[in-house]
């Protein structure tokens, strides 16, 4: 669970990405050495797309320039916490790490049904804490079309979709190293598009949703389009709120996320060329 208040918007109200008043969560100053990581060296050539209008989401996203180094059919899922890091306490017997893993186990087949290959940072509860730098390294190594960080909380209502608070930039790195805490910066515009797609899909299923802009580790360290999705209890009408542990509610959120990522792929990743040899699913 990332630190911050829960927000609610009424159905049929336009989603608006907002700047969170939360304090940025800073990770230690590090540098990502491109020369030492061949699989990440190719990211230096990723063209930054033109930033979209972020005040009002649109149903038909603007098509950006191709992102040739992304694996267009690969998605990384990061179920937050694990091991000694239990996350928030959802109920008396359930920790956040258990809920995020359960959601990830539902999201994987939903994405596979959309034609994606899925990599998860964990498929079970590890014996020790999985550091955020390790999670980022796993995601960056795979060069996915999208990375989804899963969080959960027992308070608030609906779903928060979070993207990096780093300023977007059109400038390519001039050196052979990228600042570790600014690795997401060249790709923020595409992360906003991804957040917008997920927000619209959730809203269409009448799930309250809010787009937030803040720094949730390890989102600033990722070199692919990335969002954090925090699931809160669902309050519909005057009845009792549906907890985040409810399987049917989790499935609704999962279906919306999977459909949104498929739509994001259609609008933001060109089909792979047939003339250039390489790994299956790569847009050259």
Image: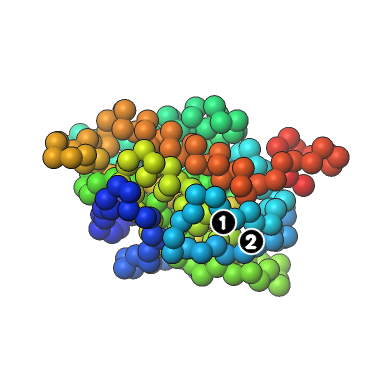
**Mark number for residue 156?**
none
Which x, y percent locates residue 195? 46, 52
Q: Which residue is depicted at the point 25% across and 40% down?
A: 234
Residue 241 appears left or right of 19: left
Q: Position of residue 19 (x, y in %)?
A: 38, 66
Q: Residue at x 43, y 42 (%)?
A: 201
* Tag 1 residue: 190
Left or right relative to 231: residue 143? right
Q: Tell me, yes or no, if residue 128 can be seen here.
A: no
Occupied quadrant, residue 52: bottom right
Q: CA distance from mark 1 to mark 2?
A: 7 Å
Q: Which residue is mark 2?
A: 49
Q: Position of residue 220 (x, y in %)?
A: 50, 60
Q: Is residue 158 visible?
A: yes
Q: Nearer the viewer, residue 149 or 88?
A: 149
Element carrying mark 1? helix
Identified at 27% across, 33% down, the residue is 245
Indicate which disc, 1 or 2, sits on the residue closer to the N terminus: 2
Which residue occupies 31% across, 68% down?
Answer: 21
Secondary structure found at label 2:
loop
Q: Name the outermost residue toward the right.
A: 275
Q: How many marks?
A: 2
Relative side of 224 to 66, left or right: left
142 and 147: which one is in front? 147
Q: Residues within 10 Å of mark 2 (few under 14, many from 20)?
A: many
Marks 1 and 2 in Cβ contact (< 8 Å):
yes
User: In this view of the protein, which residue sits in the foreground, 261 or 25?
Assistant: 261
């Amino acid at each position: 669970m990332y630190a911050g208040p829960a927000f609610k918007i009424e159905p049929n109200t336009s989603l608006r990405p907002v700047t969170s008043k939360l304090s940025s969560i800073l990770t230690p100053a590090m540098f990502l050495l491109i020369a030492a990581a061949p699989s990440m060296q190719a990211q230096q050539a990723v063209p930054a797309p033109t930033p979209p209008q972020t005040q009002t989401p649109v149903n038909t996203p603007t098509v950006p320039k191709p992102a040739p180094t992304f694996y267009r059919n690969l998605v990384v899922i990061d179920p937050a916490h694990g091991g000694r890091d239990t996350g928030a306490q959802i109920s008396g017997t359930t920790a956040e790490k258990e809920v995020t893993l359960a959601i990830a186990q539902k999201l994987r087949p939903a994405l596979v049904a959309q034609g994606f290959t899925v990599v998860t940072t964990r498929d079970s509860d590890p014996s020790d804490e999985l550091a955020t730098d390790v999670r980022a390294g796993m995601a960056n190594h795979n060069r996915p079309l999208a990375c989804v960080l899963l969080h959960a909380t027992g308070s608030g209502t609906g779903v928060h979709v979070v993207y990096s608070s780093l300023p977007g930039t059109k400038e390519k790195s001039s050196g052979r190293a990228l600042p570790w805490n600014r690795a997401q910066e060249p790709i923020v515009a595409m992360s906003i598009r991804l957040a917008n797609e997920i927000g619209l899909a959730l809203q269409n299923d009448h799930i309250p949703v809010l787009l937030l802009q803040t720094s949730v580790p390890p989102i600033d360290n990722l070199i692919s389009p990335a969002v954090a999705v925090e699931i809160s209890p669902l309050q519909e009408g005057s009845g009792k709120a549906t907890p985040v542990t409810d399987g049917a509610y989790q499935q609704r959120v999962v279906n919306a996320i999977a459909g949104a990522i498929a739509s994001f792929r259609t609008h933001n990743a060109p089909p792979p060329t047939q003339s250039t040899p390489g790994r299956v699913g790569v847009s050259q």
